[in-house]
Amino acid sequence: MKEYQFSTEDLVYIHAKGISEEEVSLQLENFVNGFPSIVLDAPATVENGGIFCLTEEEKDFYVRYYEENSQNNSIIKFVPASGAATRMFKDLYAFFSAYNGNPSTIGKYPSVKVFFDNLATFAFFEDLKAIMKAANWDIDECLKNGDYKTIISFLLDKEHLAYGELPKALLKFHKYPNASRTALFEHFTEAMRYGKSSNGSASLHFTISEKNTKEIEHEVSKSRKYFSRVTDMTFHVKLSTQKHSTDTIAVDENNEPIRDENGNLVFRPGGHGALIGNLNRCKADLVFIKNIDNVVPDNPTNDYDSVTVRYKKMLGGLLLYLRSRVYAMTGILENKPSKDDIERIEDFMQNSLSIDLSRIKKGNFSLRNRATMLLEKLNRPMRVCGMVKNEGEPGGGPFWVINGDGTRSLQIVETSQINRNKPDQEEILSKSTHFNPVDLVVSARKRSGRFYNLEAYVDPTTGFITKKSIGAKVVKSQELPGLWNGAMADWITVFVEVPLETFNPVKTVNDLLRKEHL
């Protein structure tokens, strides 16, 4: 491709963002050449050993193991929380644009009818009612007269409740007898249930957008004050934003960089894969990762709540147990292991960690070289990922993937990474049995006590190109390898089946009417 010539002003602007000219040039090449598709070998299933399906006795064992051992480990709950709630209300936006004032036409919009029929059930109803009253509007009269557009305006517009502008973290999700709680608040309650350390504290890390920093800080302060009043716990909370150095350049249909009204190059956020740097700064033995909208009310009688806590402990216990075995085996490998030691460790790596050792086993290597190669495989960050049976939910899934060296590894793959024009790849995709609910617990601590540099385990070839129409123009952006996809491509990966009850996301506002959120 031709080399793009940046002006002196361009280079100053690029470097001010913390990006090198070489990085931008590589991004421009990616737009021209594209990213290679992931090569699927098979879906990860219970039957082929890609997903472990634990017995009830095994689950109980790992829950107990977590409860007995987690107190000696530092724990952080890591929550990506920068996403705006706009998509939650897409049906309301569509209805607003089309509504002609005739109340009978609402029947053509079933989801909108459900929304208004159940408006008083939502946790944000009292706030909506109050803000309308302050502006001399009666919400009940509006409902009676079919003045739905006024209600939608007060709910979504930035001049009022601004639910169409705010991040999901700040939306009131659940109603309680004395108050309603935001999604962010509910993550405090979860951390209290399974993230409590021996000194009675819990740690959370939220990744947020810069524009909402003050509002998030205020909500964190409110949550802390509440828990300091009703419990004896202390909460340590860190907020971080996506670094501008992870932004990627935007181009037009001809792969030429586009510019803003001031003549500056346009850069876009690099997607949630950019958060690997944020995660890299979480120095803890265990980090639980879960999306901001996947929470349920804090209620001891709520089956969804108790199931969530049980399986979080199970995943954490499994990781702690496996990590203890890995630590022991790396110690053996570093000190003249016998042939029996090597074979026992290889068996563990294949059957308990799903690591493909075919290249090592096929080679005629000495014991010393085998030990060195096994050490390299074991000395990596580790993750245990909950996987839910696929019942039609969108999202990535677990697969056996063929690596560049011909070996196989377990990966979480998005459909956008797959070449669906190839019949064999489409067939493998169609046979997938589980999907990824983003329910991970990870550990980046080495046996020495130091931490791995997570950015060294990213597969840079797993990024992807997105297109967005702005008026008559098409703008192409580039997303970095996803946080739990290519950004964790070279981790030790274990998939475990968890029940659907642990996955309760809020993708549309009407999801808040599901029984698990009431």
Image (cartoon, helix red, strand yellow):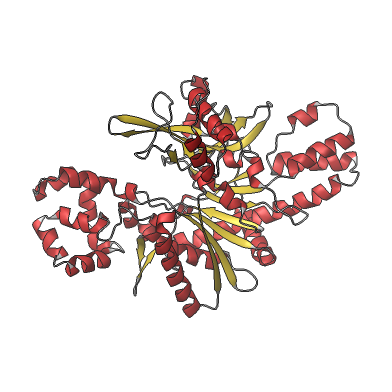
Q: Position of residue 288 (x, y in %)?
A: 57, 56
Q: Position of residue 223 (x, y in %)?
A: 45, 70
Residue ID at (77%, 40%): 376
Q: Position of residue 43 (x, y in %)?
A: 55, 33
When the figure is inspected, residue 139 is found, relative to residue 436, above or below; the finding is below
The answer to whether residue 298 is seen in the rendering is no
Residue ID at (42%, 67%): 219
Q: Residue furthest front?
A: 8
Q: Position of residue 419 (x, y in %)?
A: 49, 25
When the figure is inspected, residue 59 is found, relative to residue 7, above or below; the finding is below
* Image quadrant in which the C terminus is located: bottom left
Most foreground residue, 270 or 314: 270
Residue ID at (10%, 60%): 144
Q: In the figure, is residue 354 to the left or right of 385? A: right
Most foreground residue, 442 or 322: 442
Q: In the figure, is residue 421 to the left or right of 376? A: left
Residue ID at (86%, 46%): 334
* Quarter holding residue 195: bottom right
